[in-house]
Image: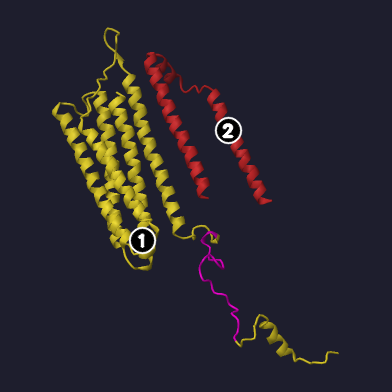
Amino acid sequence: MSPILTPPEIDRRHRAHESDNGSGRRPPTDKLTGGNGEGGDNWNDRPQGRRGPRERLSQVRMGLFFGLFAVLMFFIAIVSAFFVTRASGHFDAYSHYVNEWLPTTIPSILWLNTAVLLLSSASAEMARRSMFREVDVMDEWIGLSRRTSQRAAAWLSVTLGLGGLFLVGQWIAWDQLAAQHVFFRSNPSSHFFFLITIAHAIHLFIGVSALIAALIGLRRSHKLASRQILVDATVWYWHAMGLLWIFLFVLLEYGQ
Amino acid sequence: MKGRLRTNLLRWVWLVSLLLLGIAAQSFGQGCSQCLDNTRATPPAVQAAYRKAIYLLGGTGAALFIAGTLFIRRER
């Protein structure tokens, strides 16, 4: 038999405080998470769809890229028809095979427009990068400043101006061709020139609308993550339209 | 157990997909006879243009499919 008798309730209380170092303070029993990925705070361990802003950004990017795949296929279909029509013809009354394709002279302003679009893509990228600069993002997240949004808004405004300039340049190109009596139905070649440039201009106009929406979002949206996603998606769309235009321009300039 | 079954299934899907792609390249798709006659009646330059258009469309579609698959795998 033990020489010291301990009442059971005292023994139980003692066991609850085994890590007590004797300083008289109760050690913390409920561990609160202090960030730094502790105690299930790691967002990657959460269920899918609730892993924070990075996951949202990935989802939006994926949706955008799949949408862009569809746009690319649309233009590739037009380009395929372009190749077939360029080689096609018909038999005339004397059984001669006649090819009606007459290459359209591309207005030289399209070179300038291409340079403007490349510049606009560079300014859009500056806007996108400024939205993800870590120190400024932390400042803005804490609420010390709105430097990232202000800087991105400035670059997006430049992009918007250059995009508008590109569209005006395209309008001038169509006007120049019309002055030479080259219209949509003049020739298979002019038909494809107008089809390709107008289809691209419509898609770029959607990009301009997205830029305006992003600028409004930068002012109105309260969540930093939403502003980042908005700018990121808009800029990726803009880059895609720029790349697409370079492909189409090379085709029209050298592929006829 | 479930994970291994899934891996095996995915492996089989990949194998069957590659097999089907290989067969498709060698099967010389015939299409309708009217289209075939029309195409044969065209000069060699037009037939070459058709071929180029088919390669362009098929190549882009395949490239986008592969890029999309890799993209999804990376994001999962």
Q: In which quarter of the image is residue A67?
A: top left
Q: Where is residue A107 in the image (x, y as percent from the top left)?
A: 20, 29
User: Which chain does red denote in the image?
Assistant: B
Q: At 37% across and 59% down in the image, what residue appears?
A: A226
A108 relative position to A145: left or right: left
Segment colored magenta:
A25-44
Q: At 50% across and 49% down in the image, what residue appears?
A: B75
Answer whether labels 1 and 2 touch (C-beta < 8 Å). Answer: no
- Which residue is at the front of the view, A245 or B13? A245
Q: Single out the residue that lies furthest toward the left.
A: A179
Q: How far apart are marks 1 and 2 (CA)?
A: 48 Å
Q: In which quarter of the image is the N terminus of chain A?
A: bottom right
Residue with the mark numbered 1:
A136
- Which residue is at the front of the view, A256 or B2? A256
Above or below, B17 relative to A41:
above
- Which residue is at the front of the view, A66 or A219? A219
Q: Residues within 10 Å of mark 2 (few under 14, many from 20)?
A: few
Above or below, A213 relative to B40:
below
Q: Quadrant of the C terminus of chain A?
A: top left
Residue with the mark numbered 2:
B18
Q: At 23% across and 37% down in the image, what residue appears?
A: A113
Pointer 2 indicates a residue of which chain? B
Q: Does the magenta-highlighted stretch encompass residue A21?
A: no
Q: What residue type is labelled 2?
A: Leu
Q: What residue type is labelled 1?
A: Asp
B51 relative position to B9: left or right: left
| Secondary structure of the residue carrying numbered label 1 | helix
Q: Position of residue A151 (x, y in %)?
A: 29, 57
| Secondary structure of the residue carrying numbered label 2 | helix
Q: Does the magenta-highlighted stretch encompass residue A40?
A: yes
Above or below, A5 relative to A29:
below
Q: Where is residue A175 in the image (x, y as percent from the top left)?
A: 16, 33
